[in-house]
Image (cartoon, grey):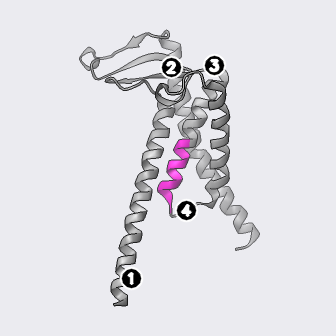
Amino acid sequence: MTENKKTKNIITSLLFLFLIAGIAAILDQWTKGLVRENLATGERWMPWEWLATYARILHWQNEGAAFGFFQGWGSFIIILSFVVIGMIIYYFPQIPKKDWGFRLALSLQMGGAIGNLIDRLKFGEVTDFVSVGNFPLFNVADSCISVGAALMILTFAIQEIQERKQKKEESIKME
């Protein structure tokens, strides 16, 4: 592969990464902004009271990681976020384009990391607002990170199944 084609592939890969991550981070910041502008910390909004038992919007500030874990670890989480984002940017161009599930998963995770990092740097804490049942509060960034992790696991599982199937077919052909 020529140096020009390699450079073009890297740029194309990074454009995909930054587009998906950017959309995720913008959506996260937009929704958090709506919550901060319209609800005081601790205030709840419920358009349909019958749904309140199951889901509600509740403005909360979180100094920890996703879902309230690691409270008081803000500086460490900021450093870790930069490391994770840097590793994704470095590693992403090396992932084959055919591994779109893995690429999408990493893009969502980076977008989530950026969304929460912006809050940490700007406010010293992260705005959470989605409250479902008794589950810890979360936001769009947390959702992107979680969906990205689930997609990554699903992608690896599908690849593993396909590889086993291919090996089985090859061994049958050899017999």
Residue type (three-letter) at the residue carrying disc 3: Phe
CA distance for labels 3 and 4:
37 Å
Q: Mark 3 or 2, which is nearer the eye?
A: 3
Q: Which residues are magenta?
A: 99-109
| Mark 4: secondary structure | loop
Q: Are marks 1 and 3 in contact (CB under 8 Å)?
A: no
| Mark 1: secondary structure | helix
The disc placed on residue 34 is 2
Q: Which mark sits nearer the N-terminus, 3 or 2?
A: 2
Q: Residue at x 53, y 42 (%)?
A: 109
Q: Which residue is mark 1?
A: 170
Q: Are marks 1 and 4 in contact (CB under 8 Å)?
A: no
The secondary structure that dominates the magenta segment is: helix
| Mark 3: secondary structure | helix
CA distance for labels 4 and 2:
36 Å
Q: Residues within 10 Å of mark 4 (few under 14, many from 20)?
A: some
The disc placed on residue 19 is none
Residue type (three-letter) at the residue carrying disc 4: Lys
Can you give x and y, in whole percent of width and height, for residue 35 in the image? 49, 18
CA distance for labels 3 and 2:
15 Å
How many numbered badges does the structure rendering display? 4
**Left or right: 167 as drawn, with respect to 22:** left
Q: Residue at x 49, y 11 (%)?
A: 41
Q: Mark 2 or 1, which is nearer the eye?
A: 1
Q: Which residue is mark 4?
A: 97
**Left or right: 5 as drawn, with respect to 161:** right
Can you give x and y, in whole percent of width and height, for residue 99 in the image? 50, 61
Q: Which mark sits nearer the N-terminus, 1 or 4?
A: 4
CA distance for labels 2 and 1:
56 Å
Can you give x and y, in whole percent of width and height, for residue 97 in the image? 55, 62
Q: Which residue is mark 3?
A: 123
CA distance for labels 1 and 3:
57 Å
